[in-house]
Amino acid sequence: MIQDMKKKKNKLFLLPYAGSSVMTYLPWKKYMSENIEPVFLEMQGRGIKSEQKMAADFETVVNRLYQEMTSEITDENYVIFGHSMGSLLAYELYYKIVSEGFRLPEEIILSGRLAPELCIHMKKVSEYPEADFLKEVAVYGGLPEEIKKNKELRDYFVPIMRSDFKLIENYVYTNRHEMIHCNLTVLYGSKDYSTPSDEIVEWRKKAGKKFSCIEFPGGHFFCMDDSNMKDLVTCLEKAFR
């Protein structure tokens, strides 16, 4: 065997959380090994797809993400990661992969969200007046001060946030009997009120293979804390070993 052949890269597919562009994960790249290739799966209506119309339903989003993701895969190992809304996207994307007969990922990593059957009674906040809507968003701790103070930024980001919240509010949970037959890891913040430790472990019931549940210090957006990034990327890379 030729020893100096270029090592095959593993692909890490990253899905956005509500109101964000997937490029918010870009700072993680500096901690990644050379054989890990992050692939930023962007939703319509933000980031590099800001000129595209935002999708009106969850199924459309998942179908588009599936087409984009599978077009990126040849023979590489791959892992899917999503935080908050991105976890729900990753969960549905897994079953889209199964239904299409595509090769399963090595692992899916779900962060900052309870199993979908535990989240079916969400408040319908997407149609709240702007001030009330932003108060609801701020509860999660991910609303930058710049958006609160700058009307131009609010005019750009609030429609995206409303659209994403509406997608989640209108999501219809289907009780699938088929387990997740790749490794399943769930991450959560120690101070995230939306993912209490005694409920986050309910994901275990969906695991048909290896299951791990890992706590990180911080609130709902623990994954964006500088102090957690290196350890979090290490956790993601373990999925390929």
Image (cartoon, rainbow, N blue to C red):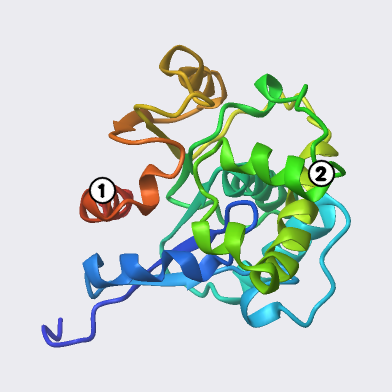
- Report the residue marked by disc 2: 126
Q: Is residue 219 visible?
A: yes
Place of residue 133 in the rendered image (x, y in percent of width and height, measured from the top left): 74, 43
Q: Label 1 amino acid?
A: Asn
Q: In the rendered image, which quarter contains the N terminus?
A: bottom left
The residue type indicated by label 2 comes to Ser
Residue at the image position 68 percent from the left and 72 percent from the top? 46
- Residue 202 left/right relative to 172: left
**Is 2 positioned to the left or the right of 132 in the image?**
left
- CB atoms at circles 1 and 2 under 8 Å apart? no
- Nearer the N terminus, badge 1 or badge 2? 2
Q: Which residue is depicted at the point 84% across and 41% down?
A: 128
Rounded to the nearest whole Å, what is the CA distance between mark 1 and mark 2? 30 Å
1 vs 209: above or below: below
- Mark 1 crowdedness (10 Å alpha carbons): few <14, some 14-19, many ≥20: some
Where residue 192 sits: x, y (%)? 44, 29
Image side of residue 165 versus residue 203, left or right? right
Placement of 169 over or under 86, stated as above or below: above
Query: How far across and down, in percent of the image, does residue 107 sit?
Result: 44, 46
**In the picture, residue 109 is in which quadrant?**
top left
Q: Secondary structure at mark 2?
A: loop
Secondary structure at numbered mark 1: helix
In which quarter of the view is residue 113 placed?
A: top right
Q: Which residue is mark 1?
A: 228
Vertical order, 227 against 179 (above or below): below
Residue at the spot x=63%, y=45% of the render?
85
Extreme residue in the front direction: 149
Question: Vertically, is 67 above or below 175?
Answer: below
